[in-house]
Image: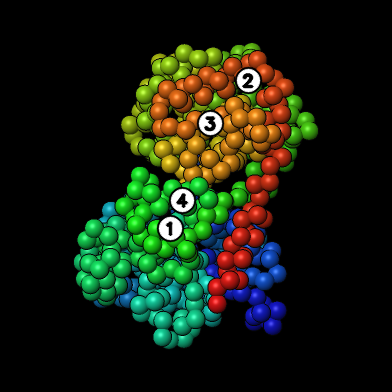
Amino acid sequence: MSKATKEKKQILFALSECVPFIKSGGLADVGGALPIALNRKRSLNVSVIMPQYSAIPHTLLKKMEHVCSFDVFVGWRKKYCGINKLKHRGITFYFVDNQDYFFNDYLYGYGDYEAERFAFFNIAVLEALPHIGLNPDIIHCHDWQTGMIPALLNIKYASSSPWDNIKTVFTIHNLRYQGIFASYLALDYFGLDRHFVDSGLIGHDNALNFLKAALTYADKITTVSPSYSKEIMTRWMGEGLDYKLAERQGDVIGILNGIDENLNNPEIDSDIPANFSANDLSGKAKCRKALRKEAGLPEKNNIPVIGMVGRLTAQKGLDLIAHVLDDILKLDLQLVVLGTGDDKYSDMFREYSLKHPDKLSAFITFDSALAKRIYAGSDMFLMPSLFEPCGLAQMISLKFGTLPIVRETGGLKDTVFSYENSTGLENGFTFTNYNAHDMLFSIELAVNTYKTQKAAWKKMQITGMNTDFSWKVSATHYTSIYLGMN
Ligand code: ADP
């Protein structure tokens, strides 16, 4: 290791998904972009470790280079662990390979087996360090899938080298997903007796809880927007762990995520039919026309297209939409939906697209290029979330000149500013209460504004497109956290 590299603080990101390797949601976007922004800081050297899923594109799997292999004990189970690596955009990515655990069609959703898969991953990350010659100052863990790393580090590894001086940061991307499993698995997978679960150190409500373990043992806890960091300390939004977060409030920091401005730039994007910018929006009309064609919606003058891209789960406010979808479709608008998730919502959108083929088009699939065409071709973006830790989709849509209609929660509250408040920052439409008719009113207001207030609309588009949502700002905040930890 060169002297210059040694003097930098070594940061190892541990996470379960990362662009461009594999993605199910915003965590992967963060994993793909934040390390790059951090690595630009003179004081840091960042690498990433993640599972090597068989679903990673073959072109990337082929480029990986084998580093080493060793055995990992998941409780009494002796398991093969291979480490492969790949340098991508200046970052070294390490991949933890075990085909029993990660040869899957889906990333998550394997019931109790999920506990064993990620128990293996958490142990493997710590065991890998001496094998690959990594000596991080800080392991930055993300979401429950890495929640046991801070706990194991403190309970089992703290007194021996090379683990003894490692600090941990844990980022909550979504408090709802905690990795909750039967309490006996703490012993079965980690060799930790019941006391650790029963006392609440790694448990909650008599169950093993990976995320709770991180809240107990991580040195610093961050979450992905300032508003969400406050909301999760309330009983209403604390998902049962508000008391623990309140207890650690001196170590909890909310840092707004950024977006990758190279990958989300309508001026250069090759996935959209016409490029455009804040100075010349003319390409956006071409994108709208092409989107209507692709979605099978008729061309209509002065009728806006509203886009929705995201997981079809209750979190995204789909119950509000279900409640008033008939009323929404009575308005002068067209709706294009792209998403995967719960059957009840996919079925709802499929059914309504058959009933109202000229007003609603639904793509029940995951398609990143189509997502871009929706961001670019829509006039508005609907995201009425029940809760939203940060939300990337609203920032992406702003970058594409598409005005968000959102509920004021979490990161949506921190990034979308209402047309109704003339603050000079207005860039969309917002409503406060989780109420379907409040949402309907905001949609109606957005549609009327679109049709009658062309200059105000354009001004909001330009404000959104010119906002700095880059990772530079967040990277500066994370850097000061890392540098403040000794
Ligand atoms: P979350 O992380 O809660 O799923 P975010 O708004 O933070 O929501 O991030 C979602 C990311 O995943 C965005 O980049 C969005 O464009 C993308 N995405 C979600 N669903 C789909 C889909 N069906 N097809 C393509 N991209 C999607």
Closer to the observer: label 3 or label 1?
Answer: 3
Q: Is residue 264 above or below residue 113?
A: above
Q: Is mark 3 within 8 Å of ligand 1?
A: no
Closer to the observer: label 1 or label 2?
Answer: 2
Q: Earlier in the sequence, mark 3 or mark 4?
A: 4
What is the C-alpha distance between the residues marked 2 and 4?
A: 34 Å
Residue type beneath disc 2 = Tyr
Residue type beneath disc 4 = Lys
Q: Are dots 4 and 1 in contact, CB under 8 Å?
A: no
Q: Are dots 3 and 1 in contact, CB under 8 Å?
A: no
Q: Earlier in the sequence, mark 2 or mark 4?
A: 4
**Label annotation for residue 450:** 2
**Label annotation for residue 143:** 1
Left or right position of 266 against 148: right
**SS of the residue under disc 3:** strand
**SS of the residue under disc 4:** helix
Residue type beneath disc 3 = Thr
Q: Nearer the viewer, residue 328 or 237?
A: 237
Q: Residue at x 61, y 30 (%)?
A: 421
Q: Nearer the viewer, residue 315 or 459?
A: 459
Closer to the observer: label 3 or label 4?
Answer: 4
Q: Is residue 129 above or below residue 315?
A: below
**Label annotation for residue 230:** 4
Closer to the observer: label 4 or label 1?
Answer: 4
